[in-house]
């Protein structure tokens, strides 16, 4: 494997599969099978969004206090994290669910040294509840945890196979970047992660690979160093 320790970022919407809301059991089982291919060959941490259940931004638009909405979104990420944990354990993968908000009955509190030790012992560590703070997205949580865990790379699993000059689902003339620097991506206004997460990765020299998680075998290929998706790095 090219990378020894990686952080996989999954969107909540990715777990919907063909559904309009919630969790598609078939999709989450597919993800667990893909992760199993890496198990015991790479130290893997995972951060999942909660957009398939609830978003803090959507609450604010409906007149709810943004802080309250963001905490509700954090709980949504915990539901997704628990679902993924169950799917992974069904594949005989040892896991630990770590929450940024204390939920002693279902998850460990985040303690950096303990989380690193879990990775060193070969357990898949799932980080739930974002950063534990309102106004921060799960992209920011992924960047923060990757830095804290000293991950070699962030793998951002999406439904498209990389970063394009425009939305490939809307513009048939959009062309794909194989590699791009953080500065180039910023100057071109490309949407990869929110600005907080993007800046954290740039300043701490953590590369990001955007790839299609829904294509079987892609996750393993990316970790092996094959040119799948788009690499974003300082140079």
Image: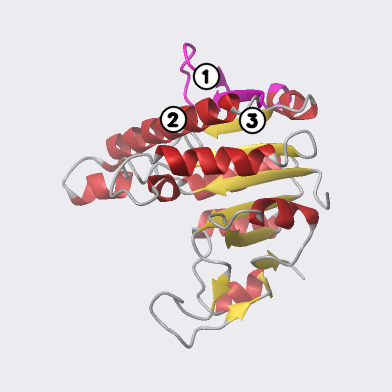
Which residues, given as a range, are shown in magenta?
A: 93-114
Residue 226 seen: yes
The correct choice, above or below, for 5 with respect to 184 in the image is: above
The correct choice, above or below, for 178 with respect to 89 in the image is: below
Residue on which the image places disc 3: 125
Pick whichever of labels 3 and 1 is earlier in the sequence: 1
Foreground: 213 or 183? 213
Q: How is the image coloured?
A: secondary structure
Q: State the SS at label 3.
A: strand
Q: Which mark is residue 78?
A: 2
Residue on which the image places disc 1: 107
Q: State the SS at label 1.
A: loop
Dot 3 crowding, Cα within 10 Å, few <14, some 14–19, many 20+ = many
Q: CB of mark 2 within 8 Å of CB of mark 1?
A: yes
Residue drawn at (74%, 67%), measured in percent from left and top?
227
**Toward which corner of the image does residue 201 lie, by quadrant?**
bottom right
Direction from residue 156 to residue 16 in the image, left or right: left
Q: CA distance from mark 3 to mark 1?
A: 11 Å
Q: Position of residue 73 (x, y in %)?
A: 35, 38
Q: State the SS at label 2.
A: helix
Q: Which mark is residue 23?
A: none
Q: CA distance from mark 3 to mark 2?
A: 13 Å
Dot 1 crowding, Cα within 10 Å, few <14, some 14–19, many 20+ = many
Residue drawn at (31%, 48%), measured in percent from left and top?
19
Pick whichever of labels 2 and 1 is earlier in the sequence: 2
Residue 205 seen: no
**Toward which corner of the image does residue 66 lie, by quadrant?**
top left
Q: CA distance from mark 2 to mark 1?
A: 9 Å
């Amino acid at each position: 494997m090219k990378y020894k320790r990686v952080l996989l970022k999954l969107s909540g919407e990715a777990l919907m599969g063909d559904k309009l809301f919630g969790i598609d059991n078939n999709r989450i089982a597919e993800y667990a099978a893909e992760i199993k291919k890496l198990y015991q060959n790479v130290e893997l941490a995972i951060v999942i969004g909660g957009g398939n259940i609830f978003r803090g931004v959507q609450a604010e638009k409906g007149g709810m206090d943004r802080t309250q909405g963001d905490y509700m979104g954090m709980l949504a990420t915990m539901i997704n994290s628990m679902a993924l944990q169950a799917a992974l354990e069904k594949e005989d993968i040892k896991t630990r669910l770590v929450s940024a908000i204390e939920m002693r009955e279902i998850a460990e509190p985040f303690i950096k040294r303990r989380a690193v030790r879990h990775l060193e012992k070969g357990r898949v560590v799932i980080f739930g509840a974002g950063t534990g703070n309102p106004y921060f997205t799960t992209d920011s949580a992924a960047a923060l945890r990757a830095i804290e865990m000293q991950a070699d790379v962030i793998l951002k699993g999406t439904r498209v196979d990389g970063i394009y000059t425009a939305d490939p689902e809307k513009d048939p003339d959009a062309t794909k970047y194989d590699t791009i620097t953080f500065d180039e991506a910023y100057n071109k206004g490309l949407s990869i992660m929110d600005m907080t997460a993007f800046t954290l990765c740039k300043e701490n020299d953590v590369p990001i690979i955007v790839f299609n998680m829904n294509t079987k075998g892609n996750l393993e290929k990316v970790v092996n160093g094959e040119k799948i998706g788009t690499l974003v790095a300082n140079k």
